[in-house]
Image (tube, helix red, strand yellow):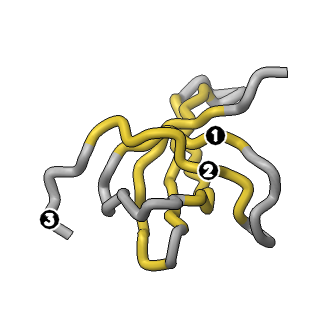
Amino acid sequence: MPVKEKVGIVVSNKMQKTIVVKVESRFPHPIYAKTMTKTKKYLAHDEMGECNIGDQVLVQESRPLSKRKRWTLAKVLSKSSLIS
């Protein structure tokens, strides 16, 4: 079975070795066909603490690391231009 991966933007890195990643999914409304955007936040494990707010990252599904943390940082796709 392939590993699930998601691309998102780092919203918070205030915890130790943990980041909050915002993932957006776009889909058409079932009746009105307007493009809808749904946002979901995931807690991901960042072992080295290399992410900053605004970075675009790739996260992979993993075994449960805590009550809410089931994703790990695979790689940083692009660094943010924001200074944080």
In percent of the image, x 51 and y 59: which residue is there?
Answer: 46
In percent of the image, x 56 and y 42: which residue is there?
Answer: 59
Q: Which of marks 2 and 1 is nearer the N terminus?
A: 1
Give the amino acid type for the residue marked by disc 1 in the picture: Gln
**Above-or-below relation of 33 to 40:** above
Asked if labels 1 and 2 touch by Cβ distance under 8 angstroms, the answer is yes
Crowding around mark 2 (Cα neighbors within 10 Å: few <14, some 14 to 19, many 20+) is many
In percent of the image, x 53 and y 48: which residue is there?
Answer: 73
Q: Position of residue 23 (x, y in %)?
A: 53, 46
> Which tag is nearer the camera, tag 2 or tag 3?
2
Q: Does dot 2 land on a helix, a strand or a loop?
A: strand
Q: Earlier in the sequence, mark 2 or mark 3?
A: 2
Q: How far apart are marks 3 and 1 (CA)?
A: 26 Å
**Above-or-below relation of 5 to 48:** above
Q: Which of marks 3 and 1 is nearer the N terminus?
A: 1
Q: Does dot 1 land on a helix, a strand or a loop?
A: strand
Q: Position of residue 29 (x, y in %)?
A: 64, 31
Residue positioned most to the right: 1
Asked if labels 3 and 2 touch by Cβ distance under 8 angstroms, the answer is no
Q: Distance between the residues labelled 2 and 1?
A: 5 Å
In percent of the image, x 80 and y 72: which residue is there?
Answer: 67
Which residue is identified by label 3? 83
Q: In which quarter of the image is the C terminus?
A: bottom left
Q: How far apart are marks 2 and 3 (CA)?
A: 24 Å
**Above-or-below relation of 64 to 23:** below
Give the amino acid type for the residue marked by disc 3 in the picture: Ile
**Nearer to the camera, 75 or 68:** 75
Q: Where is residue 28 in the image (x, y as percent from the top left)?
A: 60, 26
Which residue is identified by label 1? 60
Q: How many labels does the image show?
A: 3
Which residue is identified by label 2? 72
